[in-house]
């Protein structure tokens, strides 16, 4: 039985620079529904990407071969998510720095100056009252 989208999976693995040497694959007994078949066969795949430490456990199918395929698909999904989050965090940092260093708009500057002048007037009026000496 041919695996679904095997060529597409290989392209994704190459794009993410995931090599077979970087993967550690273990097969363990599954859990959950399935009875004797699940309890006796080691069809659950535990796939670790050694450079990043990401671990995927897959027990979607009864077949070990299919679970190996789906574990690789899930590993690609997780690594893509991690990379996108890292890019987004970097972009957010750049945007924050840009917002902090950009000059204030003319209208905002004028409002700030007006409130400062008003505040200084309030403070000037706090002095001693004349004639109460």
Image (cartoon, rainbow, N blue to C red):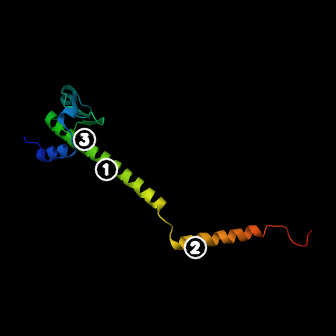
Residue drawn at point x = 67 percent, y = 71 percent:
117
Q: Which residue is mark 3?
A: 75
Disc 3, SS:
helix
Between the residue at mark 1 and the residue at mark 3, the CA separation in whole angstroms equals: 14 Å
Mark carried by residue 119: none
Contact? badges 1 and 2 (CB < 8 Å)? no
User: Which is in the foreground here, disc 1 or disc 2?
Assistant: 2
Q: Is residue 119 left or right of residue 83?
A: right
Residue neighbourhood size for the residue with mark 3, other residues' Cα within 10 Å, grouped as few (<14), some (14–19), many (≥20): many
Disc 2, SS:
helix
Residue drawn at point x = 7 percent, y = 42 percent:
2
Q: Is residue 123 visible?
A: yes
| 69 relative to 109, above or below | above
Q: Which residue is mark 1?
A: 84
| 115 relative to 84, above or below | below
Q: Which residue is mark 2?
A: 110
Q: Is residue 21 left or right of residue 123?
A: left
């Amino acid at each position: 039985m041919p695996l679904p989208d095997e060529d597409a999976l290989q392209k994704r693995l190459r794009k993410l620079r995931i090599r077979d040497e970087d993967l550690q694959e273990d097969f363990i007994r599954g859990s959950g529904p399935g009875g004797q078949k699940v309890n006796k066969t080691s069809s659950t795949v535990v796939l670790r990407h050694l450079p990043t430490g990401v671990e995927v456990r897959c027990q979607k199918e009864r077949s070990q071969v299919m679970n190996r395929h789906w574990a690789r698909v899930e590993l690609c999904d997780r690594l893509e998510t991690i990379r996108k989050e890292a890019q987004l965090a970097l972009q957010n940092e750049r945007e924050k720095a840009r917002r902090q260093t950009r000059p204030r708009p003319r209208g905002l500057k004028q409002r700030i100056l007006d409130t400062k002048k008003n505040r200084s007037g309030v403070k000037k009026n706090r002095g001693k009252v004349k004639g109460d000496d």
